[in-house]
Image (cartoon, rainbow, N blue to C red):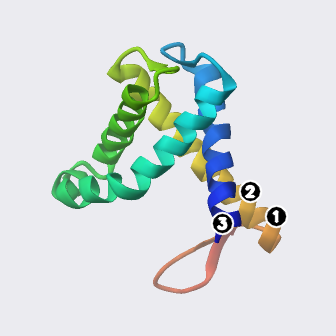
Amino acid sequence: MLFGIIVIWMLTAIGLIIVSLTVPGIRAKTTGDLLLAALILGIINAFIRPLLWILTWPLTVLSFGIFALLINAFMIQLTAELVPGFEVRDFASALLGAVIMVLLAIAGFILVEWFLFNGVFWLHMNAGRSILQI
């Protein structure tokens, strides 16, 4: 369990490194600040985000999941408020950072599926057969 927590923390840190390198409005002063921001973001995502997801579930359904990106952007901004060396200039930067983090998570899922199961299988729910294999 501890190993899994450390792996998730490191993956979050790698995601924040990529976000801080690509989004001009997000930056960390030091690597330690970036690691601390990844830790705080993980704690926030574990405790506060589920509550916000439950409270905003109707908006997320009505917006076809787009509102979830706003919640993720808010979590990044909250992390910036709690970690002094991690800065987010505005909400647009946090939103772009949230989009990049989601795309990285999807890419990570595909890579894990590909390496562990020798392919990514997209299933059609009704037939139960794979209709597309990468």
Q: Amino acid at mark 3?
A: Leu
Do labels 1 and 2 touch, CB within 8 Å?
yes
The quarter holding residue 112 reads: bottom right
Picture coordinates of residue 109, whole percent (x, y): 64, 58
Picture coordinates of residue 108, whole percent (x, y): 67, 52
At 35% across and 33% down in the image, what residue appears? Answer: 78
**Up/down of 5 relative to 25, above or below:** below
The mark total stands at: 3
At 48% across and 42% down in the image, what residue appears? Answer: 40
Work out how far the residue at label 1 is from the one at label 2, CA to CA, in angstroms: 6 Å
Within 10 angstroms of label 1, few (less than 14), some, or many (20 or more) residues? few
Q: Which mark is residue 2?
A: 3
Residue matched to label 1: 115
Residue 134 in view:
no
At 21% across and 58% down in the image, what residue appears? Answer: 57
Q: Secondary structure at mark 2?
A: helix
Residue matched to label 2: 111
Do labels 2 and 3 touch, CB within 8 Å?
no
Picture coordinates of residue 4, whole percent (x, y): 66, 65
Q: Secondary structure at mark 1?
A: helix
